[in-house]
Amino acid sequence: MRVLTGVQPTGKLHWGNYFGALRPALDLQEQHETFLFIANYHSLTSLHDPETLKRNTLDIALDYLACGLDPEKSVFYRQSDVPQVTELTWLLSVLTPMGLLERATSYKDKVAKGMDATHGLFSYPVLMAADILAVNAELVPVGKDQKQHLEITRDIAGKFNLAFGETFTIPDPMIQEHGAVVPGTDGQKMSKSYNNTIPVFGSAKQLKQAVMSIVTDSKELDDPKDPDTCNVFALYKLFASHEQQEDLAGRYRAGGLGYGHAKKELLELATDYFAPMKTKREELENNLDYVDEVMAKGSEKAAEVINPVMVSVRKAMGIN
């Protein structure tokens, strides 16, 4: 199966990003033919500072490589390095009904939250469709909030195939329920928007401050506690073995365990878990030529797949 997934360069990697998106994406490279791209064109709908975009894009490359992305197993590239995708966006847009885009709830939600109602934001699903259809992806991992966009992709592909002959594979969604929602320090979904994140590659001091700030209830040290309703325990489960989880849950229910103790145990597990990745990331930051080489080779591999698709599209539409 050919799988495609993208990640926007929107800021520093946190636990929610890692467990909700990055690690599932890395698991895919062991099972499928995987295309993974840095969606820097998509990020332009909300990010307009060029230096920040450049830094964030580099950070995504460093983060994924440090966390285990294998460029020999995955096709890893920057969206902006494959201009055929933006050409395909226009070719698809001439067939995309306005009503289809007007029904997109994501656009309405973002405008309601204060984002500018730009053409780029409105036509975001067409660029997403081009990302997917350019490589004829068969499966696309999406969260529930992006499922409608994939349905739009399917509609656009079907409309193109009906008008010009069978050209595109109709992709299926891969809804990943497990690990999709990671609680933040305040108990809401971990998100930069809520300022409740815990950094993956922050300093030891930053990590400790974030973990120790996790919101808990007001139970005293000797009171029995419910692990199933505790934000600390929910995060602990991300790192702990089954035996460790059972042990800590038992101590919660027995009483005599303070939330501060649980936070310290969480901090120790998380520090040990991410330590090899932090070391790898530091090595990569000192060898940016290698990172550039990986991204260049990734765009070449992507183009090898995309170019024949574009030849078929142009021929079908009478462009050449």
Image: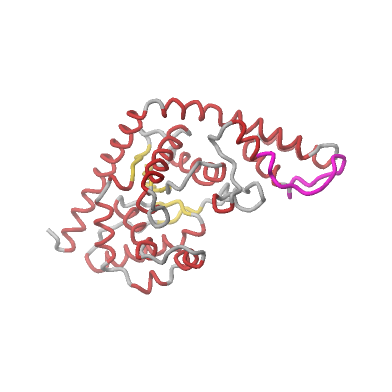
Residue 63 lies left or right of residue 198; in this view the side is left
Q: Nearer the viewer, residue 48 or 191?
A: 48
Q: Is residue 212 magenta?
A: yes
Q: Is residue 222 magenta?
A: yes
User: Coloured how?
Assistant: secondary structure
Q: Position of residue 115 (x, y in %)?
A: 46, 62
Seen as rendered, the residue at the extreme left is 320
Q: What's the residue at 36%, 34% (across, down)?
A: 71
Q: Position of residue 190 (x, y in %)?
A: 59, 49
Q: Position of residue 206 (x, y in %)?
A: 60, 36
Residue 75 lies left or right of residue 25; in this view the side is left
Q: Quadrant of the C terminus?
A: bottom left
How many marks on residues?
0
Q: Position of residue 233 (x, y in %)?
A: 70, 42
Residue 27 lies left or right of residue 198; in this view the side is left
SS assignment for the magenta stretch, majority: loop
Q: Nearer the viewer, residue 287 or 176?
A: 287
Q: What's the residue at 18%, 53% (across, down)?
A: 311
Q: Nearer the viewer, residue 260 or 95?
A: 260
Residue 63 lies left or right of residue 128; in this view the side is right
Image quadrant in which you'd find residue 203:
top right
- In this picture, which residue range is highlighted in magenta? 211-229
Image quadrant in which you'd find residue 220:
top right
Q: Nearer the viewer, residue 251 or 217?
A: 217
